[in-house]
Amino acid sequence: MSKHAILSASGAHRWMNCTPSARLELEFDESESEAAAEGTAAHALAEHKLRRALKMRSKKPISKYECDEMDAHTGAYVDFVLETIAQIKLTCNDPLVLIEQRLDFSRYVPDGFGTGDCVIIGDGTLHVIDFKYGQGVLVNAKDNPQMKLYALGALELFDGIYDISTVAMTIFQPRRENVSTYTVFKESLYQWAEETLIPTAELAFKGEGEYAPGEHCQFCRAAVKCRARAEAKLKLAAFEFALPPLLSDEEIGEVLNLIGDLTSWANEIIAYATDAAVNHGKEWPGFKVVEGRSVREI
């Protein structure tokens, strides 16, 4: 079985908004950024600490990323989980606690599976807790499709065994001082799955539907070369700068709304083209690689 699903839970925000993107991404190699590698190391350390706190056997992972900051943030995650368990124990003597639980939601998403950082069941509530070490993007649990997929996978395992009525989905993001919880009735989650998730996932798995560029493009592997995204970024060209000679206040306002994202996209194109030329011998029409000169100052 492949390590990553085509329609992954972590990429759900992307493929649910832009259904053809999942198949398009398959044309690009999957590489791990430094931030992603750091996040993986933080998850491994958090898992180890939580297992030890719950009196489970665990071998401490070794990583070049471990530091005082990571130690503090993973410790805060463990404290949060332990506090959650303690609160549940006030009304449930023996809650079920699972760490790094594989969750299969393929009933709703073709070949869909993922891993829940921590799943707790007690007193009629299914708790799904996700540890996010990233600090670049603030992540909210409300209507978060990744969390909903994890919850559906957990219900697939335990809904027939435990009397579950509500689902609490929590994102713990310590580097942004963000703890976000979204609680729904189990029935509303199933309704979303039937009415929205299943038809959207069918389109995405086939690579069908309309391209829909947006903020969800940020982590798409095809983002740099995506034609639909390029056309969206080049909306500024639609302004007739010569006629009339002066832009209206409304037009300047629209340019200001677009310019930051446009500049970011342009820098991504430059970085991609430069890397391809310098490291892979790619030749771009009208451009050539020249040796740079650095000036040292004392």
Image: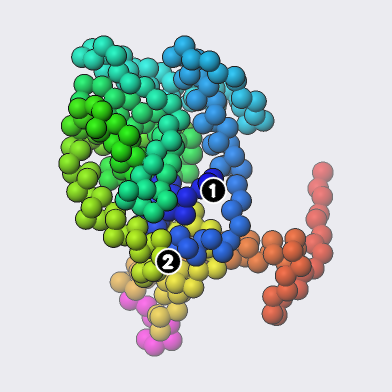
Please tell me in which quadrant of the rendered image residue 97 appears: top left
Q: Is residue 247 magenta?
A: yes
Q: Nearer the viewer, mark 2 or mark 1?
A: 1
Residue at the bottom extreme of this rendering: 243
Residue 129 percent location from the top left of the image: 36, 31
Looking at the image, is mark 2 or mark 1 earlier in the sequence? 1
Q: Which residues are magenta?
A: 241-248
Q: Which mark is residue 255?
A: none
Which is nearer the eye, 127 or 112?
112
Distance in Å between CA atoms under marks 2 and 1:
19 Å
Q: Amino acid at mark 2?
A: Gly
Please tell me in which quadrant of the rendered image residue 269 appears: bottom right
Q: Which mark is residue 207?
A: 2
Q: Amino acid at mark 1?
A: Ser
Residue where numbered disc 1 is placed: 2
Magenta-highlighted stretch: main secondary structure? Answer: loop
Give the left or right position of residue 238, taking residue 94 as reference: right
Residue 121 percent location from the top left of the image: 29, 25
Give the left or right position of residue 142, taking residue 119 as reference: left
Q: Secondary structure at mark 2?
A: loop
